[in-house]
Amino acid sequence: MDLAIKPAGPLSGTISVPGDKSVSHRAVMLGALAEGDTLIENFLAGADCLATVDCFRKLGIEIDGPADGTLTVHGRGLDGLREPVEVLDAANSGTTMRLLLGILAGQPFFSVVTGDASLRRRPMARVTGPLKQMGACIMGRQNESLAPLAVRGGRLKALDFVSPVASAQVKSAVLLAGLFADGETVVTEPYCSRNHTELMLEHFGARVEVSANSVRLTGRPVLKGRRVVVPGDISSAAFFLVAAAAVPGSDITVTGVGVNPTRSGILAVLQEMGADLQLLNQRELNGEQVADIRVRFSRLKGVTVAGGLIPALIDEVPVLAVAAAAAEGVTEIRDAAELKVKESNRIATVAEELRKLGADLEELPDGLKIRGRRSLKGAVCKSHGDHRIAMALVIAGLVAAGETYVQDTGCIDISFPGFAGVLKLLLER
Ligand code: S3P
């Protein structure tokens, strides 16, 4: 499927975006391991989270829905999963595969996990390494660094793990395995990555202690089924926040967005770029901070983004590059080599595709340098099967002169079913 985009008039109106992808995955997983029912409201019915649901059904968990945004997981407790008779398919979802591996490492049965062509290229040694240290038996290609991966788990040893990368998927995989180990499992990372797993473990009754960049979990807790209301996904909202900041005359509000500080780096960066952005109606939902975000057009300027801020906006870099291309001056994004191992190599794909629209980008080993304010012009570009590249290119098309075609946009359903419809609403008002 292709999308055709014309230069936009102002965006206006109030919208909401679908539920947070990271929180939706974790609610299904912890719901499955909890005793009793977990009711998940505003569950993201995107392809990634549906892959998680499918895997847990194959592990013997009864799950009702999604229906009207709600999913009910009938948890069977920490020892309630059953040996799957089929291969577990994480499809395009790194979160499904890596977090699931942590859980499978603690199971006294055999299982195999695989994914689509993109996921089978992504690095898995970062999780299979620590999980093997905890005592799981894992087999896979290239020393367990690539899926398909076969796991025979069992009683695990607690681990004090120092991760070389700031990755919530690595941290979460080890913590989820730590649920099945006696004693305390500790994960320390170079910078604090998104903390949804820690917050949700606490919400379900586990003991979690956090200090600086370390998380400590006491093993073998009793988890209790809970109600989880999923905040709107800031990674989805980001596309419209950037569009409104960059298209003259725009004024939009996105309601009910998760603004957890470990996720909301894009807000700080847009503000530093000069965006007129306000957080309204701030509140808390099951431990997660939520707000309505109002953005009005203003002239943007280039910034440098690096270090500890990077994990808090890692998924927003493709659309941040669009904001940078529309801004006055130079933007540098550094310390972001992780972008190379996302759904596509996002340093390469962002540079290749935005150049087609006339943007001036330089690929750096750990990021991008963007010289802004080159007038963008419509072009034919492609998603590389990466949902966030597809949506970032659509937003670039709004600020480019002439028509832009984005090819292969079916992948948008991975994280944001209904994206084109929400954009249309903002453009019609
Ligand atoms: C995610 C963590 C991040 C992010 C991904 C979702 C999660 O990946 O890019 O989209 O839900 O834990 P890394 O942990 O690899 O940084």
Image: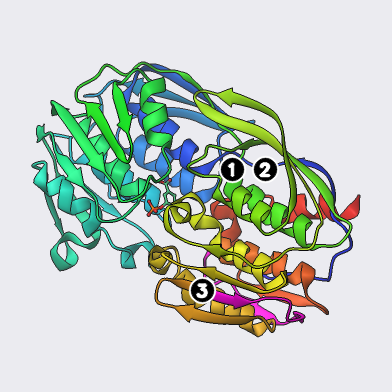
Q: Amino acid at mark 1?
A: Asp
Q: Which residue is mark 1?
A: 233
Mark 3, ligand 1, within 8 Å: the answer is no
What is the magenta range? Answer: 368-387
Q: Which residue is mark 3?
A: 368
Q: Nearer the viewer, residue 110 or 26?
A: 26
Which SS does the magenta portion mostly show? Answer: loop
Mark 2, ligand 1, within 8 Å: the answer is no
Q: Is residue 408 left or right of residue 418?
A: left
Q: Residue at the location (35% across, 36% down)?
A: 56
> In the rendered image of this protein, does residue 204 appear above or below residue 414?
above
> In the rendered image of this protein, does residue 326 appear above or below residue 209?
below
Q: Amino acid at mark 2?
A: Val
Q: Which residue is mark 2?
A: 17
Q: Is residue 383 magenta?
A: yes
Circles 2 and 1 in contact, beta carbons < 8 Å: yes
Q: Residue at the location (25% across, 24% down)?
A: 80
What SS does tag 3 mark? strand
Locate residue 50, reporting x and y percent: 48, 43
The numbered mark, 2 or 1, whose residue comes first in the sequence reads 2
Locate residue 282, reporting x and y percent: 66, 28
Q: Amino acid at mark 3?
A: Leu
